[in-house]
Image: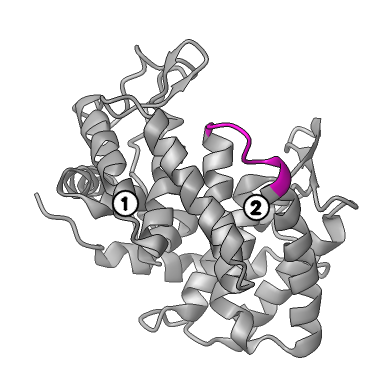
Amino acid sequence: MIWKPEPELLMSLDAAIPDILASQNDNGQFGTEPWISTDQNLLLSLAAGWSLEESRYYGDEAVLSAIVRGGDALIDAQDEAGMFTFRKKDHSTWGQIYMPWVYSRWMRAYWLTRDVFGSEDRDRWDKALLHGYTGISETCLDRVHNIPTHHAMGLYFAGLTFERKDWVDRAVAFGHRVSDTQSEHGWWPEHDGPVVSYNFVYVDGIGTLYTMSQDEDLLACLDRAARFHAAFAYPDGSMVETVDGRNWYHTTVRSGNPGFSHTPRGRGFLAQQHGRLIEAASDGQVFDADYAATMLL
């Protein structure tokens, strides 16, 4: 089974952008109260629409303005170390963190749009992201785990953007550590056994790192992971939970991520899972905007 990006990915991205723009408040924050840093993950969806020539939002000034204001909201929320408060929508807080999902999307959005920023906006974003990724580089890559794997991917983009070859090299070297830690059967261990759900985080980080670096040593790792996930999926597309060291059963169809797009086994998995989602969709919004963005970039 051969996979290639379905039209529904771009359709889903474009369909979501008006609601994303409407959800932005005057202070640049997206979403509803209480505001949490991951509400700004929408920056990558906007940047994808703005940068993809096939999108009807390609080069759109309103989208670019929303990106700038959205990043400014993150700058306002950074503490002295460049961290964010780990807050959830139930108002609970879990300390300060270099939130990996936020930093990677913010960084990638900037990588796509930086060349058209005005000088003041660029200086402000440069300072904030350099500060954050200095902290990430120095403190967050000390062990192989799903969060540091995601951070390494973001660090690679930071290295490209700011011409920091040491960051690029460190990100790839960490990717090799992640690959070396993987089981020969395609999973990574956390807690008391292999992970299934969190395995997708590793595959996403390594897969996006491979997209940019084309480091051939990472391909075998992605192929093993694709083989594992193809085997540990139920016929309805949900993931097998009985061996998962961290998560219980969820009924949802796991769509995949860019890491599956690089190998024949992975593309087969994407074709299977996407096909199920497209068949089940009742409207044009098959994929959420963030997923569509990551698959199209």
Callout in the foreground (2, 1): 2
Q: Magenta stretch containing residue 171, yes or no?
A: no
Percent x, y of residue 229: 27, 31
Q: Residue 259 at what x, y percent from top left? A: 34, 49
Q: Amino acid at mark 2?
A: Val
- Give the CA separation, mark 2 to mark 1: 30 Å
Q: Residue at x 35, y 81 (%)?
A: 54
Residue 136, image x and y in percent? Answer: 69, 48
Instruction: Label 1, secondary structure: give it.
Output: loop
Tag count? 2
- Disc number for residue 268: none
Q: Which residue is mark 2?
A: 102
* Residue in view at x 54 percent, y 45 percent: 150
Would you place residue 270 above or below residue 14 in this image?
above
Contact between marks 2 and 1 (CB within 8 A): the answer is: no
Badge 1 amino acid? Ser
Horizontal side of residue 178 vs 272, given as left or right? right
Residue bearing the label numbered 1: 282
Relative height, residue 249 to residue 169 (above, below): above
Query: Chief secondary structure of the magenta span?
Result: loop
Residue at image x 11%, y 54%? 2
Toward the viewer: 171 or 197?
171
In this rendering, the answer to whether 258 lies above or below 182 is below
N-terminal of the two: label 2 or label 1? 2
Q: Which residues are magenta?
A: 138-145
